């Protein structure tokens, strides 16, 4: 810093020059000591904890020897009240194995990054309480998607399906007046409310048997996205007809066999199956109109 | 090498808005982001978007409230631009289909928020950010904007001129998370940084794990000053165990704060006799901690936020998301019991110094959103002013970068004639660690010292003129850095460094600050830097190596922690969110000025620039700020 007392600066530099190796060795030693301390602390923490939770975590890495064959690793994590599956994964990664890989970001069920297969069902790890699960807790990547590494799956197919339904607001015209908004009835806003809560986590798609067997099936998330626009009165009738053509195609709403698995796993409680059923009824109505 | 006209770094609200704007101007635009856009932390914003839309309100009032909220450290041209452009931008979002909450007449709803003289916070339930983010991503899809998602930008490709003001930005270098390649992205017209906040500098924060302030750190190292970094907002209502945000909307709708004795302390202990719970965030956060420090906190840690009296119907209509958050992350049912809350890091008022058009002092380099400092928020941001900032200044940056003809900015950037040099006495030298053995790997940067201890000059002749060469050189450098991280198999884990850094910042550079604490923090930061010289990445894989990514991020956090703390130590007054034990008053005679800090090739340099209080048609006179 420009304002640094000059003497100090010179002194530091001189020291660095005269004995850099020694300092480095000392620093390394301190690091090792610290690392050892840290491990000891982690061990103590573990011993002191009244409870630990046993996790069995799926591991796979296509290019790392020993991980090319999928396997399960065991982690024992000190349990604290209120701890989520994500908390446990973070603890395991930061204290035991820094190569443990999973997506996560917001920690509050809004970014949709951390949907995984926990004890046999699709869940958002950040809002799944460890205390409510049977142990050992088995954590696997979302089924029916290609595994990239450990708990990370390839989301591209999910994104492609979302984009296939023209997932953007379209209307013939918006009001021209300065600062004039489109009016929307409170009831209509309420009608689309649940459908707008989707966080693109992919849990529904992963749980769906139909999607697993038919790669072209739009799937519950994309159909729900289309529902969100189809039901929005601001888009207008012409657009509604256009959207229906997308939805009633061969791999659209009719593929759904009403198994409710998507609805059961949705972390945002979106009534996905009901939305799909409603669109089927709309499809029937719209076809009757042309007869 | 990839090539586009405009490269936007970051896919949150500001980045998406900038990309759409640039695309609308005909620029071939791409977003490069370490997350898929819909994962961005804009999605976690709850409360709303301030905009003077209704009769009885005016942009002038919005500007006045914002200036007062900033404690007279916002620049009038920035604030007035925000207040004037916000209404049009909000209506624009409505035209893009954003599902705002509605009034009986079908118009978008607005509600009261802290520090506002009119209920001008436009909202969509208590999940406004989620809807804003998704609505804008939808538009980006509609425009066919190319998105490189899960590509982490690690460095900017900037020329080597001696003075930062002479440098040019020609692109970025990014790491492809899925495949492990380091690639160059050449930007023919401009690079826009929209990388969000640095919340991970602290351990109790509302910010996402990904909010590591990468944009600030990259711009800083490239020579752009960071402005007013000492002003960190601590939000008064976060859940104690996780830092999850409970929207100001709860208080906006009538929620009340109580201490352990059941007193409504904002009034009963005189913190804000008029506005009570709806005083500005800095005021409420200090009040809560004072209650706790004086023994009136619950469990010596938090206070209660009570919304039960609003009734189930109103809560479900306007604040439903809050019920889910309180239930899922604190195990509390907001309908039948009060919610425990305490202050948590929430927002960085400072940032990359820009003008009203988003431009920095480096040609071709822009910033927008939380990572930028125009400066709209000064020393304290009002609730509901972050989202309009994203869309107003994101759009402007996008337009300017794409080459749209725009009014010349009134705010100046870089070291100008009005600037004065600053001084701060630090216990340890800040800036880069001059590691003589391998400068490239950890502390990084072409600016590191050579073996003789003297700095290499930045100028290296002919390569400067050719943008392609500038990008290629940066790619080479970053490949080397990544390679050396992957090869190093002994050393310290980044997670250990990050954890200690966060703990020290939370302990020493929090709501209440004093000189001893700040000096201790600087020592801890120095130690973190030194340890980082020996950082290693255990995971050898090129496939989705989050160990490597987080290690790269931790370096950014160290730079930002230092910038925040240096500013906090330098500023000897109490203004807005910056409280100093030794200096209990706002000192306008000396401190109506912005703190600027530039990297200066590894020897951080402090300077000041006067605040602009002259607006379009009036001058804002600093007054005592009371609520």
Image (tube, rainbow, N blue to C red):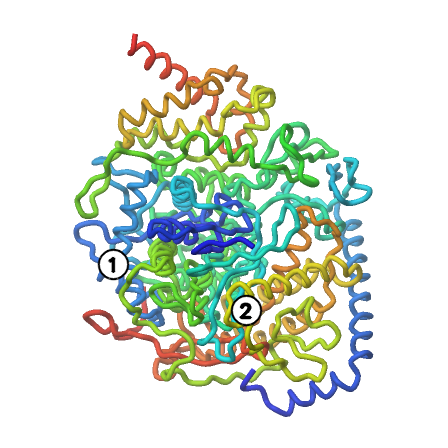
Classed neighbour count for the residue bearing mark 1: other residues with Cα under 10 Å, few (<14), some (14–19), many (≥20): some
Classed neighbour count for the residue bearing mark 2: other residues with Cα under 10 Å, few (<14), some (14–19), many (≥20): many
Which of the 4 image quarters holds residue B322? top left
* Residue under the image location 25 percent in, 38 percent down: B103
Q: At which x and y percent is residue A236? A: 27, 28
Farthest residue, direction bottom: A7
Q: Which residue is mark 1?
A: B84
Q: Is residue B404 left or right of residue B549?
A: left
On what subunit does the disc labeled 1 rest? B
Q: At which x and y percent is residue B223? A: 51, 73
Q: At which x and y percent is residue B27? A: 38, 53
Disc 2 and disc 1: Cα gap in Å? 35 Å
Residue nearest the observer in this picture, B412 or B606: B412
Report if residue B256 is visible in the image: no
Residue nearest the observer in this picture, B448 or A15: B448
The local secondary structure at tag 2 comes to loop
Q: Which residue is mark 2?
A: B509
* Residue under the image location 17 percent in, 53 percent down: B56
In the depicted structure, whether residue B212 falls above or below residue B409: above
The local secondary structure at tag 1 comes to helix
Residue nearest the observer in this picture, A127 or A260: A260
* Residue under the image location 75 percent in, 48 percent down: A49
Residue under disc 2 on the same chain as residue under disc 1: yes
- The numbered mark, 2 or 1, whose residue comes first in the sequence reads 1
Q: At which x and y percent is residue A23? A: 79, 78
Quadrant where the N terminus of chain B sits is bottom right
């Amino acid at each position: 810093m420009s304002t640094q007392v000059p003497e100090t600066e010179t002194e530091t530099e001189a020291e660095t020059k005269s004995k850099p190796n020694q300092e480095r060795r000392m620093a390394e030693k301190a690091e090792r000591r610290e690392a050892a301390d840290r491990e000891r602390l982690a061990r103590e923490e573990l011993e002191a904890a009244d409870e630990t939770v046993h996790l069995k975590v799926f591991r796979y890495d296509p290019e790392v020897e020993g991980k090319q064959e999928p396997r399960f690793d065991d982690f024992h994590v000190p349990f604290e009240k209120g701890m989520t599956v994500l908390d446990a994964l973070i603890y395991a990664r930061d204290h035991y194995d820094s190569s443990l890989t999973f997506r996560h970001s917001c920690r509050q069920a809004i970014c949709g990054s951390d949907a995984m297969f926990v004890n046999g069902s699709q869940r958002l790890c950040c809002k799944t309480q460890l205390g409510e699960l049977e142990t050992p807790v088995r954590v696997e990547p979302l089924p029916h998607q290609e595994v990239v590494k450990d708990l990370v799956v390839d989301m591209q197919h999910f994104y492609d399906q979302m984009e296939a339904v023209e997932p953007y607001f379209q209307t013939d015209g918006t009001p021209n007046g300065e600062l004039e908004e489109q009016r929307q009835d409170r009831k209509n806003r309420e009608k689309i409310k649940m459908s707008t809560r989707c966080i693109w986590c992919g849990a529904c798609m992963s749980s769906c048997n139909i999607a697993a067997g038919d790669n072209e099936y739009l799937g519950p998330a994309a159909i729900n996205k289309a529902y969100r626009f189809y039901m929005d009165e601001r888009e207008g009738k012409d657009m509604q007809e256009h959207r229906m053509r997308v939805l009633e195609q061969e791999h659209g709403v009719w593929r759904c066999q009403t198994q409710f698995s998507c609805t059961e796993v949705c972390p945002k409680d979106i009534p996905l199956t009901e939305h799909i059923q409603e669109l089927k009824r709309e499809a029937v109505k719209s076809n009757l109109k042309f007869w | 090498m990839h090539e586009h006209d405009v490269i936007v770094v970051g896919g949150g609200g500001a980045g998406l808005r900038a990309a759409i704007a640039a695309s609308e101007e005909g620029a071939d635009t791409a977003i490069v982001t370490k997350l898929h856009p819909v994962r961005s932390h804009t999605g976690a914003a709850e409360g709303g978007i301030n905009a003077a839309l209704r009769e009885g309100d005016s942009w002038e009032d919005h500007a006045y409230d914002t200036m007062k909220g900033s404690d007279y450290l916002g620049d009038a041209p920035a604030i007035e631009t925000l207040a004037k452009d916000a209404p049009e931008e909000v209506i624009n979002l409505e035209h893009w289909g954003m599902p705002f909450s509605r009034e009986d007449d079908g118009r978008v709803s607005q509600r009261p928020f802290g520090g506002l003289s009119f209920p001008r916070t436009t909202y969509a339930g208590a999940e406004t950010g989620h809807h804003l983010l998704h609505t804008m991503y939808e538009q980006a899809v509609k425009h066919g904007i190319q998105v490189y998602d899960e590509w982490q930008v690690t460095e900017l490709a900037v020329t080597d001129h001696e003075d930062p003001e002479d440098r040019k930005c020609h692109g970025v270098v990014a790491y492809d998370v899925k495949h492990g390649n380091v690639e160059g992205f050449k930007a023919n017209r401009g690079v826009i940084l929209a990388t969000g906040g640095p919340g991970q500098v602290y351990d109790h924060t509302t910010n996402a794990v990904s909010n590591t302030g990468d944009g600030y750190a990259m711009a800083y190292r490239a020579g752009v000053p960071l402005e007013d970094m000492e002003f960190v907002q601590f939000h008064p209502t976060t859940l104690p165990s996780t830092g999850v945000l409970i929207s100001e909307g709860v208080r906006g709708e009538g929620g009340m704060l109580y201490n352990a004795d059941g007193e409504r302390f904002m009034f009963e202990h005189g913190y804000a006799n008029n506005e009570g719970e709806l005083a500005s965030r800095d005021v409420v956060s200090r009040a809560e901690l004072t209650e706790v420090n004086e023994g009136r906190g619950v469990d010596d840690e938090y206070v209660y936020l009570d919304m039960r009296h609003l009734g189930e119907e109103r809560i479900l209509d306007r604040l439903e998301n809050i019920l889910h958050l309180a239930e899922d992350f604190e195990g509390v049912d907001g309908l039948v019991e009060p919610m425990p809350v305490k202050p948590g890091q929430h927002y960085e008022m400072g940032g990359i110094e820009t003008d009203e058009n988003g431009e920095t002092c480096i040609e071709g380099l822009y910033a927008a959103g939380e990572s930028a400092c125009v400066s709209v928020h000064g020393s304290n941001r009002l609730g509901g002013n972050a989202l309009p900032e994203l869309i107003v200044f994101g759009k402007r940056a996008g337009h300017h970068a794409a080459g749209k003809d725009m009014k010349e900015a009134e705010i100046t950037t870089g070291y100008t004639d009005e600037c004065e040099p600053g001084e701060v006495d630090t216990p340890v030298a800040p800036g880069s660690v001059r590691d003589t053995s391998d400068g490239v790997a950890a502390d990084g940067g072409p600016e590191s010292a050579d073996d003789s201890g003297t700095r290499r000059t930045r100028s290296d002749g002919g390569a400067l003129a050719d943008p392609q060469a500038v990008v290629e050189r940066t790619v080479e450098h970053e490949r080397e850095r990544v390679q050396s991280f992957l090869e190093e198999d002994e050393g310290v884990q980044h997670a250990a460094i990050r954890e200690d850094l966060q703990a020290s910042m939370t302990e020493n550079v929090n709501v209440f600050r004093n000189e001893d604490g700040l000096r201790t923090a600087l020592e801890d930061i120095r130690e973190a830097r030194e340890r980082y010289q020996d950082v290693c990445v255990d995971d050898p894989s090129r496939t989705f190596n989050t160990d490597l990514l987080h290690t790269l991020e931790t370096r950014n956090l160290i730079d930002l922690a230092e910038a925040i703390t240096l500013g906090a130590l330098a500023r000897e007054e109490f203004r807005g969110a910056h409280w100093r034990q030794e200096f209990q008053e706002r000192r306008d005679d000396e401190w109506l000025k912005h703190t600027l800090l530039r990297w200066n090739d590894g020897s951080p340099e402090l300077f000041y620039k006067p605040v602009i209080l002259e607006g379009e048609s009036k001058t804002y006179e600093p007054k005592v700020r009371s609520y």
